[in-house]
Amino acid sequence: MEKALRFLTSGYQADIQAVLNNALFTVDYSEMVIVRDIDFYSLCEHHLLPFFGKCHVAYIPKKQVIGLSKIPRLVDVFARRLQIQERMTNQIAETIRETIDPLGVAVVVEGTHLCMSMRGVEKQNSFAVTSAMLGAFRDQQGTRMEFLELIKRRDAFPVHVPGQGVVCVNE
């Protein structure tokens, strides 16, 4: 039990700069960067019950980009704490803003909370959606809508199929 709790709350000991590991790159790129469908698992700070789901992160770089694999690692840092979904959403967005000073940051978190399923209202199929929109995502409706449309698209995505290479799969 102790070992499990240490792992599930390891985000408290994580050093954000060590997690990002200087994977910041100067580029001439000012279009949206999105990492979508990042699985996360966390513990509700009120009930110590799990909540889990998907996190979608986007930013528009000004001068720097973050190594793509660092974004899911950043999500894990904040998810591996006793947490509430609203705070976690803001922490991810603010950390990206503070780290690379982009034109804008957007984070959407979709979570299923066992504290709502197992106790309390006992609603099995409900989930919570939270968002943090900073900079261009807050100020420019078109930018915000483009991001929201892109994270909900499920019509085609690349998949590596052994023996066939990369193919597009339509749902």
Image: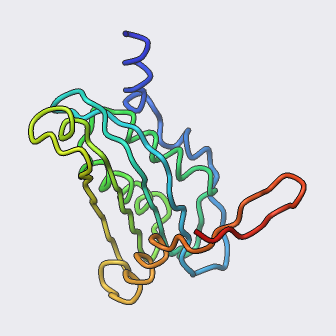
- Counting labels gives 0
Q: Position of residue 43 (x, y in %)?
A: 30, 32
Q: Nearer the viewer, residue 124 or 99?
A: 124
**Quarter of the figure with residue 145:** bottom left
Farthest residue, direction left: 120
What residue is at 47 percent from the left and 42 percent from the top?
16
Q: Position of residue 6 (x, y in %)?
A: 40, 18
Q: Nearer the viewer, residue 60 or 112?
A: 112
Q: Position of residue 80 (x, y in %)?
A: 39, 34
Q: Nearer the viewer, residue 81 or 170?
A: 170
The quarter of the image holding the C terminus is bottom right
Farthest residue, direction top: 2
Colour scheme of the picture = rainbow
Farthest residue, direction right: 163
35 sits to left or right of 76: right
What residue is at 41 percent from the left and 84 percent from the top?
143
130 sits to left or right of 157: left
**Quarter of the figure with residue 77:** top left
What residue is at 32 percent from the left and 50 percent from the top?
111
Q: Nearer the viewer, residue 76 or 27?
A: 76
65 sits to left or right of 74: right
